[in-house]
Image: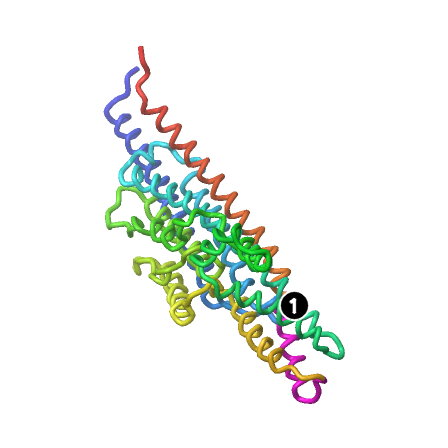
Amino acid sequence: MPPTDNQGSFLNRISIRRNQVAYEHEIEDVEQFQKHVTDRLSELFHPQEDTTTSDPPETILSIAWFRKLLDAFLCCEAEFKAVVIMGRDANNFSKSPLDRLIPEHLDRSVKALDICNAIIHGIDLLQHWRKLAQIAVDSLNQKPITEGHVRRAKKALTTLLSSISIDDKEIHHHTNKSTSSSNNNNTTLGNIKSLSYPFARTWSAAKQIQAMSANLTSPRGGEPTGLVVPLYLMSSVLVFVMWAMVAAIPCQERAGLGAHLQLSKQFTWAQPMIGLQEKIGEQWKKKEKKGRSGLLLETQRMEKLGLSMVEFAERFVFPVEGEKAEEVAAMVAEMEEVCGRMEEGLVALDMQVREVFNRIVRSRAETLDVLDQLNKMTTPVPY
């Protein structure tokens, strides 16, 4: 028996109501996602020192802080995938502007993978610096400190400070010349070569970040789908995290990195992110110089202590006694503390960066699977 007009009207109302319920759930999920991101960024903007544990304080730009930053990214990425990708009707991705924004996000992901590789190499370099600093610590911890101990410490610290101050162009220049250098210079040039970056000379971390943010624009009012907002949010988080890591960890060619991302202030989560950008940007302007040290707190302390310890070595007179002995002991103890934090923290940070890399790869593959489903749905079947 065919449905009456009343039955048809009722079924239409039920369909509309179901669609409305689904839309309301989507809006609720997006709002929750934004709130969680806001909370995580706010915690990063106001890091708290936990006095109940022996863990290092999460001071902004410290290794502990960057570990918390990457934890926040991984949490955001998992929630983003649950809101936007998992169980999502592929037809949503065919609607404007998602048909353009999704491919742009995937392209940013590829560039982020390059940044992750650069950061992993930079962490290896930081570990090399830590080992040089540890040689100086072990030498100057001897009792009594002899001229031989000082000479060994000075050699390690000079290599450390030279590596920190040398810029990318000089690395490539010395690396290219190393094969034709004399045997007397082989050790020094060999050290420089081992610290060079595994990228083409034209590769630039700063330009990579700029390319990631070039087409990152805030959603306009009245967008046809609520998925635009979480997509913009996740892209912004991705670019910010990569930008902050490049500012702190030694990376190839960072000129112009101080430029801020242009974020819309209409979103609550943008406020703490903008605040963090301003804090990091101020530090970059203060410390931007020829060299590769970056803004990592432990590296800054290591460089400062290294300079003071070299100054002591140049004025060394045996025996070291009184106030001078106390001053040297204090410097060595502080450098030893920095080395300890780096030894433990950098291993964990390296593992997190690798997890970020793998997570981006998996999420990108899952998104491509959805797009592939869409292509199959829209491809006409030949008869």
The answer to which quarter of the image holds residue 96 is top left
Residue 43 in view (yes/no): no
Question: In the picture shown, does residue 314 fall above or below 102?
Answer: below
Q: Nearer the viewer, residue 206 or 112?
A: 206
User: Which residue in the rendered view is the most extreme toward the front?
Assistant: 182
Residue at the spot 38% in from the left edge and 45% down from the top edge: 108
Q: Nearer the viewer, residue 182 or 259?
A: 182
Question: In the picture shown, does residue 88 fall above or below 328?
Answer: above
Q: Position of residue 91 (x, y in %)?
A: 33, 32
Magenta stretch mostly in which secondary structure? Answer: helix
Q: In what element is the residue under mark 1? A: loop
Q: Position of residue 256 (x, y in %)?
A: 35, 60
Question: In the picture shown, does residue 322 fall above or below 2?
Answer: below
Q: Position of residue 29 (x, y in %)?
A: 41, 47
The answer to which quarter of the image holds residue 329 is bottom right
Query: Magenta span covers which residues?
Result: 319-340
The answer to which quarter of the image holds residue 126 is bottom right
Bin the neighbour count of mark 1 within 10 Å (Cα to Cα): few under 14, some 14-19, many 20 and up: few
Image quarter in which the C terminus is found: top left
**141 left or right of 280?**
right
Image quarter in which the N terminus is found: top left
Question: In the picture shown, does residue 148 fall above or below 124?
Answer: below
Q: Which residue is mark 1?
A: 54
**122 left or right of 239?**
right
Q: Position of residue 116 (x, y in %)?
A: 48, 49
Q: Nearer the viewer, residue 136 or 348?
A: 136
Residue at the spot 65% in from the left edge and 80% down from the top edge: 328
Q: Is residue 78 magenta?
A: no
Q: Hey, what amino acid is under mark 1?
A: Ser
How does the figure colour the protein chain or chains? rainbow
User: Which residue in the rendered view is the most extreme toward the right?
Assistant: 143
